[in-house]
Image (spheres, helix red, strand yellow):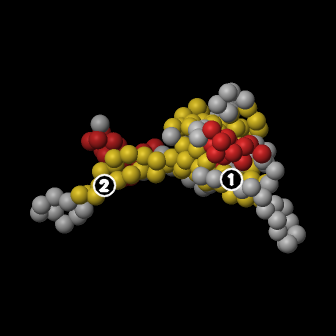
Amino acid sequence: MPDFNLRSQDVLNSNLGTLWLITQDGKQRKMADVRNITADIEVATEEFRCIGEMMHRHKGVGMRGSGSMTLYTGTPEFVDYLTKFKSFKQNFRFEIYCEVADPESPAGTANGRGARAVVLRDVLLHGAQLFKLDTEDGLLDYDIDFDFDEYDILQNFEPTQYSSLADTGSAGVGDFVSNLVNAAG
């Protein structure tokens, strides 16, 4: 039976990766001033019922991409984008390229199971901070929310022994998952 203990080197370090801003005219800037960033996909669902059934059912009818990031104060691009929007009445969209790659983890190295590289396309800001002063000692930072219309996964992690129930060697769970997959196909 395989060993399914999660080792510390199997977990990805959240600080190791690369983040780039790509403008509409193709200019690229490494975003070293970002403290954290998250991008999520939400599935829009509609609920419905059938006569004679007690359970409500759900149907996926669309998707929405959104995210947020925290930056150290001093990033001029985002205020510039919104100033152009104010002046020219046109949204300024851009792309964000993010790669997660932890050289210690087999999940995050090119010689292991790869890294994850994602491009968010048609990113639109919800706003930007014009200025901030704070009486507390510390670093100035601010949060920005954004939406994106498309995304591409350029490189993805390979499945691990921890993420694949069908390959556990357990006759009960593996057969159950295999039967579900075959029934759906």
Q: Residue furthest left?
A: 52
Q: Nearer the viewer, residue 129 or 158?
A: 129
| Tag 2 residue | 46
Residue 142 quadrant = bottom right
Q: Is residue 52 above or below residue 71?
A: below
Q: Residue at x 46, y 47 (%)?
A: 64
Q: Nearer the viewer, mark 2 or mark 1?
A: 1
**Residue depicted at x 30% and y 51%:** 59
Q: Which amino acid lies under the numbered mark 2 shown in the image of this protein?
A: Glu
Name the outermost residue toward the front: 87
Q: Is residue 105 above or below residue 57?
A: above
Which type of secondary structure does the marked residue at label 1 adopt? loop
Identified at 69% across, 45% down, the residue is: 83
Q: Residue furthest right?
A: 137
Q: Nearer the viewer, residue 175 or 111?
A: 111
Can residue 76 be seen in this snapshot?
A: yes
Residue identifier under label 1? 128
Label 2 environment density (alpha carbons within 10 Å; few <14, some 14–19, many ≥20): few
Decide if residue 55 is on the left or right side of residue 85.
left
Q: Which mark is residue 39?
A: none
Quadrant assignment for the C terminus: top left
**Residue 28 locus on image (x, y percent):** 73, 32
Label 2 element class: strand
Q: 180 or 63: which is nearer to us? A: 63
Amino acid found under the numbered disc labelled 1 = Ala
Residue at horizontal 65%, vertical 42%? 87
- Residue 88 horizontal/vertical position (percent): 63, 38
Q: Are marks 2 and 1 in contact (CB under 8 Å)?
A: no
Query: Looking at the picture, how far across and down is residue 49, in whole percent?
Result: 20, 60
Between the residue at mark 2 and the residue at mark 1, the CA separation in whole angstroms equals 33 Å
- Say whether disc 2 or disc 1 marks the residue closer to the N-terminus: 2
